[in-house]
Image (tube, rainbow, N blue to C red):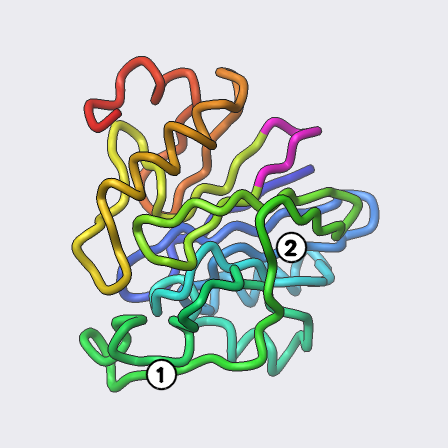
């Protein structure tokens, strides 16, 4: 597995290209934008996107999806929460930062579901709190967790936005993410990478 990260979109969200170096198949996580650099990287490396995984429905994690789909018509996945944040510009915050946008047609995923793409298995861990549809994707065989805006280096996601809840967020992290091994590498939606062990020991919110 090779992972390339890009600061995407107007909020510099971490977008990840998870690549199978043999087949060139690539899974894209949280494309908050689709820059010329990202496009050129896909072409120069001869990568073959096969899926887009969204950790939640906020605009800064999905604004690049429409442009990517024009070139690579791949399935998009998001957690199947009661409220579809992707389809409401007020709740996905796009109307606050932009003219507003929606995204429809995403495939729903559920707690514990395992998605197999590019030779890797992505286990869905439902972690509401930042939003009602927040989830993480855990690649157990590689020891990597894509945590979106649930868990950051020495911090946690905001809970004061629509559908957020601080108590739910902390419970999600403590009861689900902190059960993972210490050595699991955490790749968040913003800021730098960390590990489960470091967050267990040093995160002041936990």
Q: Quadrant of residue 120?
A: top right
- Assign a secondary structure to mark 2: strand
List the residue tagged with mark 1.
Answer: 101
The residue drawn where x is 47% and y is 63% is 81
Q: Nearer the viewer, residue 69 or 47?
A: 69
Residues shaded magenta: 138-143
> What is the residue that sits farthest to the bottom in this orientation?
99
**Residue 144 horizontal side relative to residue 192, left or right:** right
Q: Earlier in the sequence, mark 2 or mark 1?
A: 2
Secondary structure under tag 1 reads loop
Q: Quadrant of residue 112?
A: top right
State the residue at coordinates (61%, 27%).
Answer: 143
In the visual, does 47 lie left or right of 154? right
**Coordinates of residue 29 in the picture (x, y in percent):** 53, 55
Q: Quadrant of the C terminus?
A: top left
The foreground one among 146 and 128 is 128
Is residue 31 depicted above or below 91 in this figure? above
Viewed as shown, does residue 124 lie left or right of 169? right
Q: Which residue is mark 2?
A: 27
């Amino acid at each position: 597995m090779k992972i390339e990260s890009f600061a995407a979109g107007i909020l510099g969200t971490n977008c990840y290209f998870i690549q199978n170096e043999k087949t060139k198949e690539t899974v894209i996580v949280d494309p908050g934008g689709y820059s010329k650099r990202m496009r050129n990287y896909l072409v120069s490396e001869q990568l073959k996107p096969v899926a887009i995984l969204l950790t939640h429905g906020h605009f800064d994690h999905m604004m690049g999806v429409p442009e990517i789909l024009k070139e690579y018509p791949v399935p998009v996945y998001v957690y199947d929460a009661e409220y579809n944040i992707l389809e409401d510009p007020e709740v996905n915050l796009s109307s606050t930062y932009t003219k507003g946008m929606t995204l429809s047609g995403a495939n729903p995923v559920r707690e514990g579901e395992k998605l197999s793409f590019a030779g890797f298995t992505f286990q869905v861990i439902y972690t509401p709190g930042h939003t009602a549809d927040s989830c993480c994707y855990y690649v157990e065989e590689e020891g990597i967790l894509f945590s979106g805006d649930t868990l950051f280096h020495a911090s946690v996601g905001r809970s004061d936005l629509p559908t957020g809840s601080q108590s739910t967020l902390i419970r999600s992290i403590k009861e689900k993410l902190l059960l993972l091994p210490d050595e699991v590498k955490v790749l968040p939606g913003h800021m730098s990478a960390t590990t489960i062990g470091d967050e267990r020991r040093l995160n002041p919110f936990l």
